[in-house]
Amino acid sequence: MEPTYTYLKKRYEFGKQCFFTDEGPVLLEDFKPNKKDFEDYIFQNPVSKETQYSSIQAEHSVNTTRAEFEDRGMNHVEGGWGKDINVQDAEQTLRYKKKIEKDEEYIRTILQLSHAMEHCILQNNAVNIYESYFQDAELSNLVEQTTSRTTNVYKDPCNIKRPITHLSWSADGGVRLAATHCNLEFQRASPELSTHSYIWEIENPNKPQMILTPAVPIVCLEYNPKDPHILSSGMFSGQVCFWDTRKGSDPIETSPMEVSHRDPVHNVLWINSKSGTEFFSASSDGQVKWWDNRKMNEPLETLILDVQKDETILLSRAYGASSLEYETTIPTRFMVGTENGFVIQGNRKGKTPQEKLAGVFKAHLGPVCSLQRNTAFVKNFLTVGDWTARIWSEDCKESSIMWTNFHRAMLTDGSWSPARYSVFYTTQTDGTLNVWDILQQQRKPTLSMKVCDDALRSLRVHENGQLVAVGNDKGNVYLVEFSGNLAVNNKNDKALLTAMFERESRREKILEAKMREFRLKCKVKPQDFTTFPGQQNEMGEKLDECQIAEREFFAAIEKKK
């Protein structure tokens, strides 16, 4: 039984009863058209216009059908054997095969199938499927297409623009880029110039992630490879300091002026130490200093770049440093590029100054702007200076093993690619970025890109090899992305590059031996130049008057020495 409830209400509470009747339409008002308004009517092309009065809604999530996977395996066992046959026993299976081959049913089956099989074999033998149709065709050289594009531009927020002097990628995958701004021209810097340098997040070119506010301009800045929050820097005043981005935009500690460099610090590099707190710096005052950021009141060690073989080390004879190189796989060795165009090979563990400055290379006519070892071949290093870039081997100190042609514009920086061993990059004062792949061609760059109209001053390659950051005189940093073939090593690249370096090194050694032999022949004793008319030379031939005069001239020079 369903429960029911009855609502009770009296009739008069409903109100007056309504009575409805049918009635036709009634005209309330009639507005007649005005004929004068027809003259003002203008015909227009029909225009479709939509109007949305409801609120716009969009679905922010999508439910997709979930795919369910499962793993299944199959145990395949060689079939055709009897239950009493052990497949692993070779002797037992051999006896079973011989038994089957003697069976009449087996022989009859083979005879029936042999006719069809023979027909297929004859068909296959009618055509040589291994025939090569293009044996005499000449193979064309395949040149990989390389591309480049500028992805981001990071501009100096200051009103008065300053040149970029150094760039450094962070150690946590290169998600941040540190750029230093400093005007190094002598007595050209305005006192109104800002001393700020910036740390950029590569995905956000609109605003720097952090502004570094030192007391004097920063010339160089380098990330710690073990801690992405720690940086070391060299200042325009010759001081060095280190930073911690977690503790603000001011330096944590700065070296005292009296123990620092006398000239601007052009390069600082971190050392592969156990503590991860040591770095060293090089300046144009001719000194290299080692530091520990836990104790910045004095350097750990100081080396004067005096290459004269003398017991007395003089700072006045030292070569000013313009670039610095350090390879973590060789922790005790380093290289310094000087303003005189020399590359000095150093060994920190040397006992005497001569052992610490082991070798000298005459690299360029002017300052060595860049110096870097190859990632895979540490015996070979790249130098950039004046109008050319050179590749050297530690075994050949008299000349480089490879070099580029002289450019119309001066080169300012260069770097090897950390991903592809045969590729290196160079920048020029006309705003051009060159990409060289020595396995493809050596006479001209593989790719040249006009980045901007101003001079490019600094270059740094990302660890993945595809991104390159370059800075110019106007304080702009350009992030350039290259195609993938410039960042991936092919299968035989390392072997081909090894053979190329060994061949060029062997050639230079042969030339050096020939030059030494020639110089020894030229070192003739003074009495050997003294000749008289009618005298004969070593071959028994009579000397003419010109040869006699030449020998007398050299004899006179030797007497004056």
Image (spheres, rainbow, N blue to C red):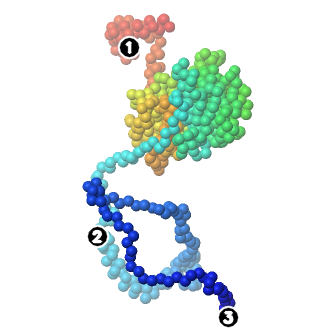
Q: Is residue 252 visible?
A: yes
Q: Residues within 10 Å of mark 2 (few under 14, many from 20)?
A: few
Picture coordinates of residue 136 (x, y %)? 28, 52
Please name the amino acid that badge 2 sits on: Ala
Sequence-first tag of 3 and 2 = 3
Sequence-first tag of 3 and 1 = 3
Q: Which element carries disc 2, helix, strand or loop?
A: helix
Picture coordinates of residue 96 (x, y %)? 52, 82
Q: Are dots 3 and 1 in contact, CB under 8 Å?
A: no
Q: Which element carries disc 1, helix, strand or loop?
A: loop
Nearer to the camera, 206 or 283: 206
State which mark lies toward you, 2 or 1. Answer: 2
Q: Is residue 351 left or right of residue 459?
A: right
Please name the amino acid that badge 1 sits on: Asn
Residue that protrudes farthest toward the left in the picture: 39
Quadrant hosting residue 60:
bottom right
Q: Is residue 492 visible?
A: no
Classify 554 as above or below 407. above
Nearer to the camera, 294 or 49: 49
Instruction: Give the residue at mark 3.
Output: 1
Q: Which element carries disc 3, helix, strand or loop?
A: loop
Q: Residues within 10 Å of mark 3 (few under 14, many from 20)?
A: few
Q: Residue at x 63, y 82 (%)?
A: 13
What whole-number distance in Å separates the C-alpha atoms at marks 2 and 1? 79 Å
Nearer to the camera, 347 or 548: 347
Instruction: Give the residue at mark 1.
Output: 537
Instruction: Give the residue at mark 2.
Output: 126
